[in-house]
Image: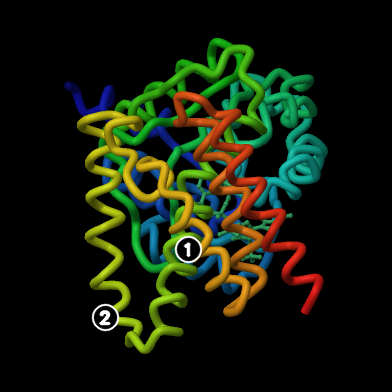
Amino acid sequence: MAANGMLTQRMSQAVSIVGAGRVGRALGRRLHELGWRVGGVTAQSMATARAAVRAIGEGHALDGLTHEILNSRFVLITAPDGAIEGVAEKLAQIGGKEWRGKVALHTSGALDFSVLRPLAELGAATGSMHPMQTFSNQNIPDLAQCIFGIDGCPTALKAARKMIHQMGGVAVRLSGANKAAYHAAGSFACVYVLVLIETATRLLMAQGFKRRQAMRALLPLARQTLNNFERIGPLAAWTGPLARGDFSTIERHVKALADLNPEYLAAYKPLARLTAEEFAAQPGAMLNQLDRIFGAATVSKKKK
Ligand SMILES: NC(=O)c1ccc[n+]([C@@H]2O[C@H](COP(=O)([O-])OP(=O)(O)OC[C@H]3O[C@@H](n4cnc5c(N)ncnc54)[C@H](OP(=O)(O)O)[C@@H]3O)[C@@H](O)[C@H]2O)c1
């Protein structure tokens, strides 16, 4: 490619990042590595914006939402869900008609692209690209094969697909999907898995295990379960007392948890019921058995 052509391509691949926290830094870093030019980088505080520029490896730390954000054709809004609408309104005020021809994408899983309407009304192509992945402050997850749920106008979809493809991810168009429900699925697979494994860890620690031992006991179990889910499917992966119809063991669990921590018992009951509903050949019969046990547990607790 001629030097001019390369320059034009590099200029056209400039991206500003608004809300450079966990996701903004990770995507910014990845896009920078792929040759995108990172322009304005902004957070609420200047210290965060500066730290983000260091983490990304390129960009100008901006003091809040300033006009410099519009120096890039692409604007990635990675602010928290609750801030996106306000950010879009402020960016619309700052940029006015300059938004025509720009592409604005947010990364929320629960909000669709309509939250960027103030920018769309000014002629920007608007959309969203949500990585179905968890981003912490400590590391950047592998985005290869990561599913990104996308929605938006055709130009924004095209831009999102290009970015995602370059990052090694897979774009899935969320046409007509309820994004909040789509995002709730991610919560079940991520944060609720996390809280369940932490609860299991604490249960073992309450029985004398050190945290490290508890993790060594539980992680292989959890990993094998996920491997089985992937390889042989949910029904074949289903083991444990409910799968065997062993209600006496469920009764023992209930008694032990009631004595140890009522919160754990309160979580255990709906999980057992959900297991029956999702997996049992005759959910009604299993639910009746469970409700008998749980009802008895409630009565005996009240008597105490
Ligand atoms: N974390 C995940 O695992 C994950 C995964 C997929 C999608 N997402 C989505 O990605 C988005 C960002 O999530 P995150 O976890 O990266 O959030 P985060 O780590 O809390 O980062 C949010 C960033 O936005 C900045 N910010 C907050 N309010 C702002 C405002 N009004 N204007 C400009 N910047 C503002 C914060 O700045 P200060 O630090 O200075 O306050 C911070 O840098 C959310 O929509 C989230 O749903 C998150």
User: How far is the residue under mark 1 from the one under mark 2?
Assistant: 36 Å
Q: What residue type is labelled 1?
A: Ala
Q: Which colour scheme is used?
A: rainbow
Is 94 positioned to the left or the right of 279 in the image? right
- Mark 2 burial class by Cα count in 10 Å: few <14, some 14-19, many 20+: few
Check residue 86 in the rendering and tell me which mark sits there, or answer none: none
Q: Tell me: residue 209, above or below residue 195.
A: below
Q: Can residue 27 be seen in this view?
A: no
Residue 223, horizontal then vertical, whole percent: 26, 53
Secondary-structure class at tag 2: helix
- If the image is split into quadrants, where does the C terminus sit? bottom right
| Residue 161, x across and y down, in percent | 41, 21
Ligand 1 placement by image quarter: bottom right
Closer to viewer: mark 1 or mark 2: 2
> Where residue 130 sits: x, y (%)?
51, 35
Q: What element carries label 1?
A: helix
Image location (x, y in percent) of residue 81: 69, 46
Closest to the observer: 74 or 177? Answer: 177
The quadrant in which residue 260 appears is bottom right
Q: Of residues 225 and 112, which is closer to you in this image? A: 225
**Beta carbon at label 1 within 8 Å of ligand 1:** yes
Residue 213's label in the rendered image is 2
Which image quadrant is residue 106 in? top right
The residue wearing badge 1 is 52
Query: Mark 1 or mark 2: which comes first in sequence?
Result: 1
- Disc 2 residue type (three-letter): Gln
